[in-house]
Image (tube, rainbow, N blue to C red):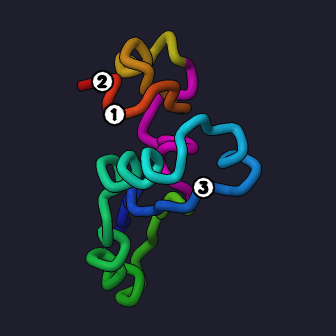
Amino acid sequence: MVAHIPHASRFIPVAVREQLVLDETALNEELLLMTDAHTDLLYNRIMTLGGTGFINIVSRLVVDPERFPDDSQEVMAARGMGAVYRITGPIRR
C-alpha cells in the first residue's frame, strides 16, 4: 500500500516565509483554506502496517507535488497555481 498525502502540512520554512507578502492573518486564512488538515494522521495506519507514505513535509503553498514542474504542462498554472503558487485564495474566488 502507498499513502499519497500531499496537502496536510502547514509548515513554511523561514526563508520562504520571508518572501511571502501576506501578513500573519492572511497567511493563516490561506493555510486554513488550502490545507487538508489531519489527512496525515488519518492515513498513518498504512505506514504502521508496513506501507509506504509519500507525505509532503511543507505546505502546498511552498510547493504542490501534484503539479507538473513545467507550468506549460500544468493547466492550473493559468490560475496562478502551478508547482509554485503565485496567488492566494481570495484572488481566485
Disc 2 from disc 3: Cα separation = 21 Å
Where residue 76 sits: x, y (%)? 36, 21
Give the residues in magenta. Answer: 58-70
List the single residue furthest toward the bottom: 48
Question: In terms of sequence position, does the residue under pointer 3 or pointer 1 come before the other?
Answer: 3
Which residue is at 72% across, 56% downward?
14
Which residue is at 31% across, 30% downward?
90
Determine the secondary structure under disc 1: helix
Residue 12 higher or lower than 63, as above or below = below
Q: Nearer the viewer, residue 74 or 88?
A: 88
Question: In terms of sequence position, does the residue under pointer 2 or pointer 3 come before the other?
Answer: 3
Residue 60 in magenta stretch = yes
Q: Few, some or many C-alpha atoms within 10 Å of disc 2 (few <14, some 14-19, many ≥20)? A: few
Quarter of the image that includes the C terminus: top left
Q: Which residue is mark 2?
A: 92
Q: Are marks 2 and 1 in contact (CB under 8 Å)?
A: yes
Q: Which residue is mark 1?
A: 89
Q: Which residue is mark 3?
A: 12
Looking at the rendered structure, which numbered label has been put on residue 34? none
Residue 8 in magenta stretch = no
The three-letter code of the residue at mark 3 reads: Ile
The three-letter code of the residue at mark 1 reads: Gly
Magenta part, dominant SS = loop
